[in-house]
């Protein structure tokens, strides 16, 4: 059972997690990953792995990656005149 314009589906309508979808059939997608602080729990590499895993499971091919490695800036204003 499958979709006429997409990858084969489970009866519930979900993409099979064990099915390998050829790259020629996958929909190109971009991923955006961001690291704003040193204390952030998920590194950019962890974010990329999670996005690629989800993309694979849903019939997408990560064709482009946008990375934002900027740090959050905090400062205080001196109130003295």
Image (cartoon, rainbow, N blue to C red):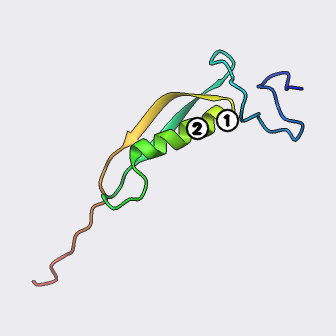
* Up/down of 19 relative to 37, above or below: above
Q: Nearer the viewer, residue 4 or 56?
A: 56
Q: Position of residue 57 (x, y in %)?
A: 67, 35
Residue drawn at x 62%, y 18% is 23
Disc sitting over residue 27 in the figure: none
Q: Is residue 26 above or below residue 11?
A: above
Report whether 81 appears left or right of 38: left
Q: Position of residue 46 (x, y in %)?
A: 45, 45
Res 10 quadrant in image: top right
**Going by the picture, which residue comes out furthest to the left?**
81
**Residue sitting at x 65%, y 15%:** 24
Quadrant of the drawing holding the C terminus? bottom left
- Count the numbered circles shown: 2
Q: Position of residue 65 (x, y in %)?
A: 45, 33
Label of residue 53 in the image: 2
Residue drawn at x 40%, y 45% as measured from the top left: 44
Q: How crowded is the residue under tag 1: few (<14 C-alpha within 10 Å), some, or many (20+)?
A: some
On the picture, is 53 further left or further right than 19? Answer: left
| Circle 2: element type | helix
**At numbered mark 1, what does the secondary structure look like: helix, strand or loop?**
helix
In this picture, residue 77 sits left or right of residue 27 = left
* Left or right for 1, reference 43: right
Residue 9 quadrant: top right
Q: Is the Cβ of the residue at disc 1 closer than 8 Å to that at disc 2?
A: yes
Which percent across, then down, holds residue 28? 60, 25
Task: Return the residue found at the far front.
Answer: 18
Q: Quadrant of the N terminus?
A: top right
Q: Which residue is tagged 1?
A: 57
Q: Residue at 80% across / 22% down in the picture? A: 5
Q: In 3D space, how far apart are the residues under numbered discs 1 and 2 (Cα atoms)? A: 6 Å
């Amino acid at each position: 059972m499958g979709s006429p314009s997409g990858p084969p589906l489970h009866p519930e309508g979900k993409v099979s997690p064990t099915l390998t979808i050829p790259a020629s059939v996958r929909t190109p997608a971009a991923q955006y990953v961001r690291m704003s602080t040193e204390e952030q729990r998920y590194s950019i590499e962890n974010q990329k792995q999670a996005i690629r895993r989800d993309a694979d499971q849903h019939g997408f091919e990560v064709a482009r990656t946008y990375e934002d490695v900027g740090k959050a800036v905090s400062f205080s204003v001196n109130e003295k005149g």
